[in-house]
Image: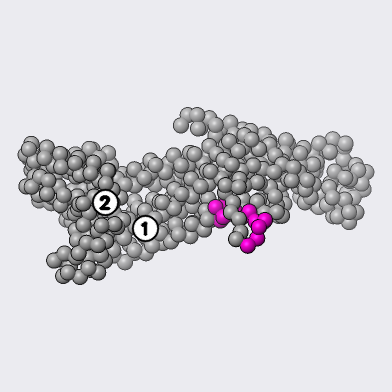
Amino acid sequence: KPWEHAKAGEGSAADPLAARFVASLDYDTRLYKQDIAGSRAHAAMLHAQNLLTDEDLSEINRGLSEIESEIDEQGDNWSGWNVELEDVHMCVEAALVAKTGDAGRKLHTGRSRNDQVALDLKLWIADAYHSIDKKYTNLIEAFISLAEKDGEVVMPSYTHLQRAQPIVAGGELMAWTAAIDRAQQRLAALVHSYPENPLGSGAIAGSSLPLNRDMTAEVLGVGPASMNSIDGTASRDAGIDFVYALSMTAMTLSRWAEQWIIYASTEFSFIKLDDLYTTGSSMMPQKQNPDMLELVRGKVSGVYGQLIALLTMTKGITIGYNRDLQEDKRFIFTAYDAVCDCLDMATNIVKTTRFKGEHIAAKLNEGFLDATSLAEYLVNRGVPFRTSHQIVGSLVRKCQADNLTELSDLTIEQMANASKEFNVTFDKDVYDWLTPQNVVKRYQSSGNSGLPGFKAQLAHWKNVLANN
Ligand code: ARG
């Protein structure tokens, strides 16, 4: 990058380290579009307030448009990037002055880099939100398409990572779908929670010039002018909210990755990851490691790190701009890039994974998955639940003592004998409540993760997507 080789300016006493140290140009060039949009709005407002002539305004707009297309085309190689100028705001303004002379020299009227950067960041978050929002939807679509392929595979659910009740694979896929949808909505809610325009706050105290802050707010679509000029320049709440919502997304993805790493193990063999998303070992020829899932889990630590960095950065600074705040963008961009990558990677993995129905079925009779269903059978026959829980517990122990793997291996007589003291009877319809295959069809409560619940949720999500 050319600015890395630029010399330090007079202001930094010709110390190249000081120039590099104080500059944010190696990460804030990402803000150039937002910076130019903010400048256009500011110029339009200054013009409306008779602080710029018609000619000044058209010169400024011409210059800004040229600069925008130059950076669009040249990116990092744009000749205007100069580390001596510290940041994107100064580089763009210097280029504007070079192109338009006095018109450009008027642009910064009633403005400071403090309100400028606060605005740019808000605009950037709004734009970033629009790009990342689609990635959540893509992932939800991937979960739904996998659910349509393999959703009816009967499998165990786990609490404490111990076999719990039978579900269908689609029930679990709908769980991830609900969690990702919530993460998507959380981000939307936080991004839109405090729409405020910091521009016009100046450096800290506002301006004696007749700035119309509601006008720039309207042009930029960021919401009304912020209430207080000090808070407007000194708060970074919007950035922290953004990274918090990203952290929650990353946490959800990490949890999913962990689950699927377990499912992809030989011991579980519940899913087959596509070869594209496994890697070999340099030594062990047979290996297919779920490295991409591991990195989805691994990258979350960095995202959390950025959140903690932002919270820590702000905790000790007085209410007014301090240069510490410049680091915010580094943290926010890093977290955002990581979560974007994780969402995309997750989508590709989900799209290409299949559930191994036969492997799962082969061991489905282990773990007495239908025990709760049998207890509910007795409830239907008038037995208090605590009693039926006790009865089924004794039936499970009988199976274990007699080396029977499943409750359905018991005859009706064995069931009645084992629970004689409770004075209950069993009918042959009891077998409709037994075996995982039967149980997944019996769930009735809304939101259940058996077959009926899965089908209802699938229909719900397809409807949501169709109306997006
Ligand atoms: N690049 C700086 C930032 O991101 C701009 C603000 C500099 N303001 C100042 N008063 N020195 O925060």
Give whichever of discs 1 and 2 has the lower sequence position: 2
Q: Quadrant of residue 1?
A: bottom left
Tell me which segment is drawn in magenta: 283-294
* Label 1–label 2 contact, CB within 8 A: no
Majority secondary structure of the magenta segment? loop
Q: Is residue 226 visible?
A: no
Q: Identify residue for label 2.
A: 77
Assign a secondary structure to mark 2: helix
Q: Position of residue 346 (x, y in %)?
A: 53, 46
Q: Residue 416 appears at what percent x and percent y?
A: 90, 45
Within the magenta stretch, is there residue 290?
yes
Please tell me whether mark 1 sits on a helix, a strand or a loop.
Answer: helix
Left or right: residue 251 versus residue 153 is left
Q: Nearer the viewer, mark 1 or mark 2?
A: 2
Disc 1 marks which residue?
331
Q: Is residue 99 left or right of residue 406?
A: left
Residue 381, quarter of the rendered image: top right
- Does 315 appear above or below 432? below
Q: Which one is in front, 136 or 50?
A: 136
Q: Please, is residue 425 above or below residue 298 in the view? A: above
Q: Is mark 1 within 8 Å of ligand 1?
A: no
Q: Amino acid at mark 2?
A: Asn
Q: Which mark is residue 208?
A: none
Q: Is residue 275 left or right of residue 36?
A: right
Whether residue 64 can be seen here: yes
